[in-house]
Amino acid sequence: MRKTTAWQPHQPLPQYADKATAAAIITHHFFPISPRTLERWPLTVRRPNKATIYEVDELMAFAEEKLNSAYFYKQTEG
């Protein structure tokens, strides 16, 4: 199993991504996330040759929705 990702931030987004690559994409574009967290997200998973593959468009839409609905507040100096 590959632990590093073939995708780098300067490259275009792929159509499909494995867990490590998907986590790297979300971390770069939205917020830090581990590959294991993706297992709990309600995403469509494809399983060619027993590998877990996500559709990047669906992944990005869900991450953006999650970020936009996150609790936020303004910090003040105490």
Image (cartoon, rainbow, N blue to C red):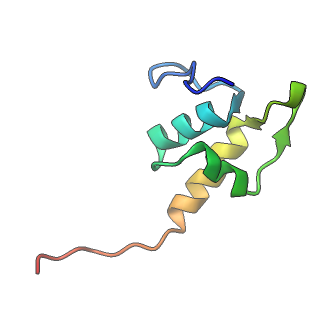
Q: Is residue 46 above or below residue 15?
A: below
Q: How many numbered callouts?
A: 0
- Residue 31 drawn at (x, y percent): 46, 50
Residue at image x 60%, y 59%?
A: 65
- Residue 18 drawn at (x, y percent): 69, 31
Outermost residue, bottom side = 78
- Front residue of this view, candidates 32 and 67: 32
Residue at image x 70%, y 57%?
A: 40
Residue at image x 69%, y 39%?
A: 57
Q: Is residue 34 above or below residue 73?
A: above
In the rendered view of the protein, which quadrant contains the N terminus?
Answer: top right
- Front residue of this view, candidates 78 and 11: 78
Outermost residue, left side = 78
In the rendered view of the protein, which quadrant contains the C terminus?
Answer: bottom left
Residue 60 picture quarter: top right
Outermost residue, front side = 1
Residue at image x 47%, y 47%?
A: 30
- Front residue of this view, candidates 48 and 13: 48
- Residue 50 drawn at (x, y percent): 86, 31
- Residue 28 drawn at (x, y percent): 45, 38
Q: Is residue 8 left or right of residue 61?
A: left
